[in-house]
Image: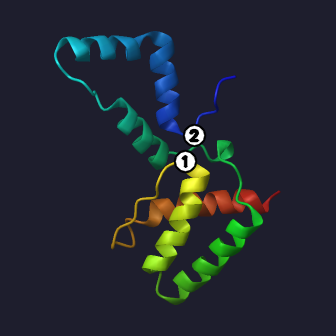
Amino acid sequence: MVEKSKGLGDDIFKITQKTGIHKAVKIISKAIGIDDCGCEERQMKLNKMFPRIKNIKPMNETQKKCFERIMEEVEKNGNRLNPVNRQELGMIYSDLFKQPAEWSSCGSCNKKTLDNLRRVYLKSCER
């Protein structure tokens, strides 16, 4: 059974595998002395930037309540995440997306991660 794509990175990987590009890059990289072409890291970054939300499992009830509580607190604090919020949301993100959430001190930089969580939350509420 083929695993469903988690995002754009997985889609590109599947295409490069089927067309032989992936194998060719590995052979050429090895021939010129490059051990790691960065494909896996790039795949993870693209999945994080452009996730396939419909293939991500929905939040369970505990995760939804935690997300709601944190987002209510974040809105009261001028859209700022405190370290505890980041840790809790990071655990939810890692469980859903199978990769760690990336946080920074910049609120707008965290927007993409929060938007991804919000999209999964909304999808989860539809069920």
Residue 111 picture location, percent across and down:
45, 65
Q: Determine the image quadrant of residue 95.
A: bottom right
Around disc 2, counting alpha carbons within 10 Å, would you say few (fewer than 14), some (14 to 19), or many (20 or more)?
many
In this view, the residue farthest toward the bottom is 76
Q: Which mark is residue 6?
A: 2
Foreground tag (2 vs 1): 1
* Residue found 64% across the figure and 30% down from its top: 3
Q: Residue tagged by mark 1?
A: 98
90 and 18: which one is in front? 90
Around disc 1, counting alpha carbons within 10 Å, would you say few (fewer than 14), some (14 to 19), or many (20 or more)?
some
- Say what amino acid the circle numbered 2 marks: Lys
Residue 19 picture location, percent across and down:
47, 11
* Residue found 39% across the figure and 73% down from its top: 107
- Say what amino acid the circle numbered 1 marks: Lys
Task: Tell me the quadrant of the picture where the N terminus can be found.
Answer: top right
**Above or below, 23 relative to 89:** above
Q: Determine the image quadrant of residue 41.
A: top left
Q: Which mark is residue 22?
A: none
**Above or below, 75 relative to 53:** below
Whether residue 81 is visible: no
Mark 2 vs 1: CB contact within 8 A? yes
Task: Tell me the quadrant of the picture where the C terminus can be found.
Answer: bottom right
In this view, the residue farthest toward the right is 127
Residue 67 picture location, percent across and down:
63, 72
